Image (spheres, helix red, strand yellow):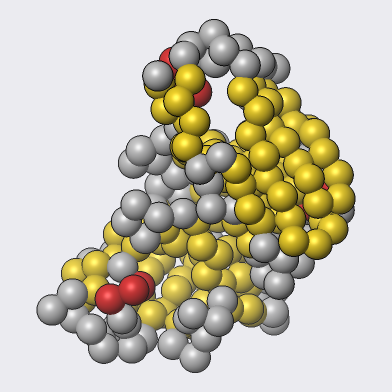
Amino acid sequence: EIVLTQSPGTLSLSPGERVTLSCRASQSVSSRYLAWYQQKPGQAPRLLIYAASSRATGIPDRFSGSGSGTDFTLTISRLEPEDFAVYYCLQSGSSPLYTFGQGTKLEIK
Amino acid sequence: EVQLLESGGDLVQPGGSLRLSCAASGFTFSSYAMRWVRQAPGKGLEWVSSISGDTEGTHYADSVKGRFTISRDNSKNTLYLQMNSLRAEDTAVYYCARRTPDYYYMDVWGKGTTVTVSS
């Protein structure tokens, strides 16, 4: 089973700042099968990035993804107030079984 | 508009049973594999179960294997999750989600339905 470890657990930042979130896999994951989600309180997860670096429909270009092998990152270039949420990575290469990272909470400083 | 709408969540006693439903609309339901994902209060996302579009393939997380059964009725555009022998640790919001045919991630999610297991 592939384990995804996200870091840090919580980040306190201000609007306008740049942030990079990390997702590390316990074994190599094809970039095709790495996705990122955003979740706000009381809402379902929202797909941001798929195939490690492709933005989903309607996602602003301040969100970008990169990485390969065991190390993947999600970058938000300039934080907007609506970006403060929890972010999860997902590996889907072992579909129909899946693994989520434990999440990174982005909070307003 | 592509939409998934879960229902059936409730308060149930330990050892009890519940059936969740997920009504799909806005896409050709039978062409897509579907998943159930849950989230315990204050916790992260946990994959629960998968089913193929033609219903021939089903898979379960170890935490629910032997207790939960996923199924679908393509004539009704509906996904189900039959949950038996419920435990306190099954308390969560349950989401149904659509799997993309190419990269296998989940692209469309329902709003979720809440299951509480408590005496």
Q: Is residue B62 above or below residue A37?
A: below
Where does the image place residue B85, in percent across and percent down from the top left? 33, 88
Q: Is residue A40 above or below residue A31?
A: above
* Residue at the image point whose x is 48% and y is 81% from the top: B64
Where does the image place residue A2, in percent across and percent down from the top left? 72, 66
Where does the image place residue A99, in percent across and percent down from the top left? 64, 61
User: In this view of the protein, which residue sits in the foreground, B78 or A22?
Assistant: A22
Q: Quadrant of the C terminus of chain B?
A: bottom left
Residue B12 as seen in the image, left or right of residue A65: left
Residue B80 as seen in the image, left or right of residue B1: left
* Residue at the image point whose x is 48% and y is 20% from the top: A13
User: In this view of the protein, which residue sits in the foreground, B63 or B50?
Assistant: B63
Residue A4, quarter of the rendered image = bottom right
User: In this view of the protein, which residue sits in the foreground, A91 or B69?
Assistant: A91
- In this view, the residue farthest toward the top is A16
Q: Is residue A71 visible?
A: yes
Where does the image place residue B48, in percent across and percent down from the top left? 52, 70
User: In this view of the protein, which residue sits in the foreground, A108 or A64?
Assistant: A108
Residue B44 as seen in the image, left or right of residue A98: left
Q: Quadrant of the N terminus of chain B?
A: top right
Q: Is residue B33 visible?
A: no
